Amino acid sequence: MTLSPPALPGTPAVHRPDSRSPKSGYVPPWLPPIAVVGGLLILVPLVAMSTRVDWANFGALVTSPSSLAALALSLRTSLAATALCVVLGVPMAMVLARVDFPLKNLARTLVLVPLVLPPVVGGLALLYAFGKRGLLGGAMNVLGIDIAFSTTAVVLAQTFVALPFMVLTLESALRSRGARYEGVAATLGARRGYTFRHVTVPLMWPALIAGTVLCFARALGEFGATLTFAGSLEGVTRTVPLEIYLQREVDPDAAVALSLLLIAIALVIVGLAYRRPGSQSIW
Amino acid sequence: MTCGVFGAVVFSTSALLALTGCSSASSSPNNETITVFAAASLTDTFTELGKDFEAANPGIDVVFSFAGSADLATQIVEGAPADVFASANEAQMDVVSAESLTAVAPVIFATNILTIIVPSDNPADVGSFEDLANADVATVVCAPQVPCGAATVTLEDTYGVDIPAVSEESSVTDVLGKVSSGQADAGIVYVTDGARAGDSVMGIPIEGADAATTTYPIAALAGASVAAQEFVDYVASPAAATVFAKAGFGTA
């Protein structure tokens, strides 16, 4: 920090990172206006929607029995799906980042598929796999497992669409950091399990939190795959997005109110995910 | 692909819809375009009627936007450039009329009734509406909030049958998908949807289904041209009635 020579009199200090905001000096001047346009593209529809909210009845609209049933179901299923994403996603990211195996690039590409697939098609794919007449339907029938039109099917659909967020977030963090701390631990005699718990997990903690929160947000907003694969029944499979989709037919006010609640939840979640380390405020 | 001055004006006011109109090869410089918003269940019949109308009225292009009636009503109320609205129920036409957006009183041009559909091998051996009361039959219906669901509730009440549905879908298409994939044992949809669904499903008529008849109103919208009203009159004509009857609709 003290290596740069003092500014000569008359020298413009524009290109020098100032002490208040050390990074902004490296941003080309034409870039922030474009960023503002991008920001407006996202912000204006949100503002437009909030102008349509029937604020006087907001509380009543989001606490109606059907809204509450949908909220409770959404929270339950999204938490379950997020837990599954952690349990399945951490090993997947570790293997992709640290283990060499044939066709690894293909595997990494396949993990992305649920992100690219239109959710309705994702739901069809799940139906062809786990449906009554699906690939695994016969075997599941023999075992007495029937997930058709059940809450389990909702969790499965949400996990399917959310899992890539966990794997991508974790894997890129693991790869960009390298394996030298694990290497040091190994030279000091630590076993693999010990190294994983005491070196790898603490180091990937921020990425794990970010991945977890993104998975939860994605699961919460899941719509198409759930509609196609699980169906829509109050308290069983009708999550908040499906309730919004249905309410819009008869009661657009309720649909808008619920949507706003979903946005509020999403804002808090994403705010938490992108909180800078050590910062007190989530904004 | 000539659109001319008029096409350019239309383009500027109703970008995408007019684009579709302009790109149809038959356009000539003085063509008038009628934009028709019609319920998704009318896709096949209206496409056919539109071609007939264009053939009988050179210089007029009919452009369609097919979607759920509630979506279309919302779009019209929000200012979408439609000339004609054909709804799959009177409630959504009322939404548009309530905003004084209809030019004249809507007329009923077709009716529809419900039917049972089952996968083609009928795994749960469904034979009648009463069979759907059995909880072992996984039945999918429309939610009571949407027109096909409201009609289903009317039939349940009329015949004292209580269907323990495993899913209440937002649209007929979603009910069809669940049954054609074999995920559900039975579903309740409109007869016209059952007729369009092909071999993957089998229809089982509901006795006395006309106790819950859905009506389809159509109206030219405020500010629409004479040609738009002519199209409305054509849809309500005996010639169009034969097209609707062929697709399984009842006629008013």
Image (cartoon, rainbow, N blue to C red):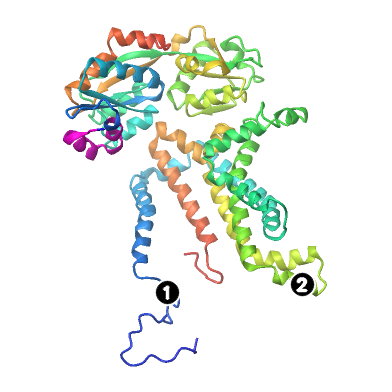
Q: Is residue A67 left or right of residue B95?
A: right
What range of the chain is rendered magenta? B2-21
Q: Amino acid at mark 1?
A: Tyr
Considering only vertical position in the picture, is A163 above or below B226? below
Residue A77 seen in render? no
Q: Nearer the viewer, residue B99 or A222?
A: A222
Tell me which secondary structure the magenta stretch mostly adopts. helix
The residue shown at (72%, 57%) is: A100
Does B83 appear in magenta? no
Q: Nearer the viewer, residue A92 or A157?
A: A92
Q: Quadrant of residue B99?
A: top left
- Tell me the subunit letter for badge 1: A
Ranked by sequence position, the earlier of labels 2 and 1 is 1
Q: Quadrant of residue B221?
A: top left
Tell if the residue under mark 2 belongs to the same chain as the one under mark 1: yes
Binning the other alpha carbons within 10 Å of mark 2 as few (below 14), some (14 to 19) or many (20 upward) gives: some
Residue B51 percent coordinates (x, y): 31, 18
Residue B42 percent coordinates (x, y): 38, 20
Return the residue at label 1.
A26
The residue shown at (29%, 7%) is: B238
Considering only vertical position in the picture, is A276 above or below B163? below
Q: Nearer the viewer, residue A88 or B142?
A: A88
Return the residue at label 2.
A185
Does B17 appear in magenta? yes
Q: Amino acid at mark 2?
A: Ala
